[in-house]
Image (cartoon, rainbow, N blue to C red):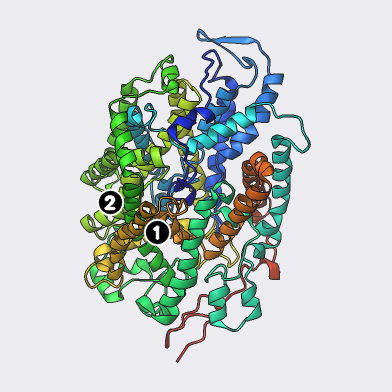
Amino acid sequence: MATDKPNGESTEERCPIEEVALIVPETDDPTMPVMTFRAWFLGLTSCTLLIFLNTFFTFRTQPLTISAILMQISVLPIGKFMARTLPTKEFRVLGWSFSLNPGPFNIKEHVIITIFANCGVSFGGGDAYSIGAIAVMKAYYKQSLNFLCGLLIVLTTQILGYGWAGMLRRYLVDPVEMWWPSNLAQVSLFRALHEREAKNKGLTRMQFFLVATAASFAYYALPGYLIPILTFFSWVCWAWPHSITAQQIGSGYHGLGVGAFTLDWAGISAYHGSPLVTPWTSILNVGIGFVMFIYIIVPLCYWKFNTFDARKFPIFSNQLFTSSGHKYDTTKILTPQYDLNVAAYNSYGKLYLSPLFALSIGSGFARFTATLTHVALFHGSDILKQSRSAMKNVKLDVHARLMKSYKQVPQWWFHILLIGSIGLSLLMSFVWKDEVQLPWWGMLFAFGLAWIVTLPIGVIQATTNQQPGYDIIAQFIIGYILPGKPIANLLFKIYGRISTIHALSFLSDLKLGHYMKIPPRCMYTAQLVGTFVAGVVNLGVAWWMLDSVENICDVEALHPDSQWTCPKYRVTFDASVIWGLIGPKRLFGPGGMYRNLVWLFLIGALLPVPVWVLSKIFPEKKWIPLINIPVISYGFAGMPPATPTNIASWLVTGMIFNYFVFRYHKRWWQKYNYVLSAALDAGTAFMGVLLFFALQNNNIELKWWGTHVDHCPLASCPTAPGITAEGCPVFK
């Protein structure tokens, strides 16, 4: 359940609340075993494996997020095998009796294993966002961070979200109005996997999954090791090898990616997730925004208007620059305490961004206000009506009534977690105050912000499947209050915003358990244990990677073809510099280079209005409400670290499967589409890990034309007169 993604913004296929019963079973068998040995074993294994893979891949140039759907599908045959082979004998330990094999592998065990697995994707991002802060502190700022301090950062942010979820579950889980549309696809998949398939021609879902996984595993040896150029197939650069403009336009890695494509599943799904599970209308909206931004706005700003002195810099880069076009050396403006040295900054000069990077930040301003306006106009009255009903507990559906037969989780269990995580966070701000920079009052401010916004945002997500983000507002606020403190800015965002993301993910899983009649105390145990295990493994793997891979994340020191460039964390570092070290006042305030981007807050707020007005004037035109301005803005979200080629290939793949295959081979799509997505994730991930441990970790590398990514050396060249860059011509 990754947030801020296009598939999280779609409402075009939402079902009326009355239709939930058609998808979610209304019956329950309270005697069905849930927390069995099989569930514990497969759940913890799934959680550990997923968090290991996701953390491992997040450092790579093409990060890959493995969703819990992989484990949801793959544990089914393993669970059935264990049910057939494990002994049924009962064991007694300290008065507690249990059996390794209490009977057939059932759907409730399957759900609880998936809940564990969801912890293995750290609720949405592949790895916990706090790992990004730790990677920045260790790899970019070269801090000697204490492991215990890092562990507290990871665990407290997630447990804090769990505490918010527990306090808000009566408003966001129990009422029928809070129906969490995204869960219905999960429920449908569970039923499809457990209901007996009719005997007909073709492979079963499980057979197809195994075949597709094997094919994906074998194929990834090509882009992953033998022919890495398949990741960025930039043929325009080969046609015009001496033209800077052609390479800026055609480079898949450092340019606009016109004509470029990727034949690497990791490249396709790296930043927006799997296109196979995204509704077609969301893909279409994202495509409109992508074409407008990459093929119209950016070229005009760069070649026509030279916006923000754009030609002094590469057209697309996640690096920071000086006014002369050279890389910005943040070490020259840092004090030994990792604060801003104002005198050194004034002497060294202002910070500049590549044009696409600057415009992408501006799009974030517009996206924030556009989301608020869109939700208010299109769903405001429904949300108010539903939330009033929910707060009064007016109406409980059949699922809520069935759940009342189970022992509930006492509220004080959640209070202990909440108070404990707040206490440990405050303790950390005193014990490691030099490392974390965020004072105790800053922590309390972050907690207060999270508490205020979690309920209203939760109501919006539970009813519309949209989650308005406020990352930029959080960073703006603390950037003005604590300028010159980059680590404090990162941690404020983690505690003030990311804890809300974790809370909403926990609540979504609680609703899944509600639909599937999982006993609340089993849910509590699975989520809590899974969170602790995932947090420890998450940090352990990241710490090992940061210490064992030489020059990890240092693009200047790494081999040019190295996969360990950490583009996600580079952007996290850039954000800490932009919002924390230098601060929004210097960049976006009066006299700042990027002050005009602030107008996009207003523009974003106004853009949904004409769409809403037209939908009211022409109610018979059902396609008008499907024009979703926040989703359109996702056409240029995440760049960098995402490249235009990543997004373009994602769009093409999504169009093939969710338009053409869905329209002309619907039965195949219904049976195999989600299974294929999970299989592609699985095969790519397993081969990627195998290649690392067997070859790349032992410095066994291939060197030939096909191992050099992109072949567009001039794409990163500036074109302004007098600007020098290594390997680039100087224009007069």
Residue at 45%, 45% (x, y): give it. 11
- Three-letter amino acid code at disc 1? Phe
- Residue lying furthest bottom: 732
- Residue lying furthest right: 201
| Tally of numbered discs | 2
- Three-letter amino acid code at disc 2? Gln
- Residue lying furthest top: 95
Between tags 1 and 2, which lies in front?
1
**661 up-or-down from 30: above or below:** below
Residue at 48%, 27% (x, y): give it. 515
Q: Please state if 606 lies on the left or on the right of 569 as rendered.
A: left
Provide the residue designation for mark 2: 437
Provide the residue designation for mark 1: 573
Dot 1 or dot 2, earlier in sequence: 2
Label 2 element class:
loop
Q: Is residue 173 visible?
A: yes
Label 1 element class:
helix
Residue at 46%, 20% (x, y): give it. 519
**556 up-or-down from 443: above or below:** below
Label 1 Cα neighbours within 10 Å, binned few <14 / some 14-19 / many ≥20? many
How far, Cα to Cα, is label 1 from label 2?
16 Å
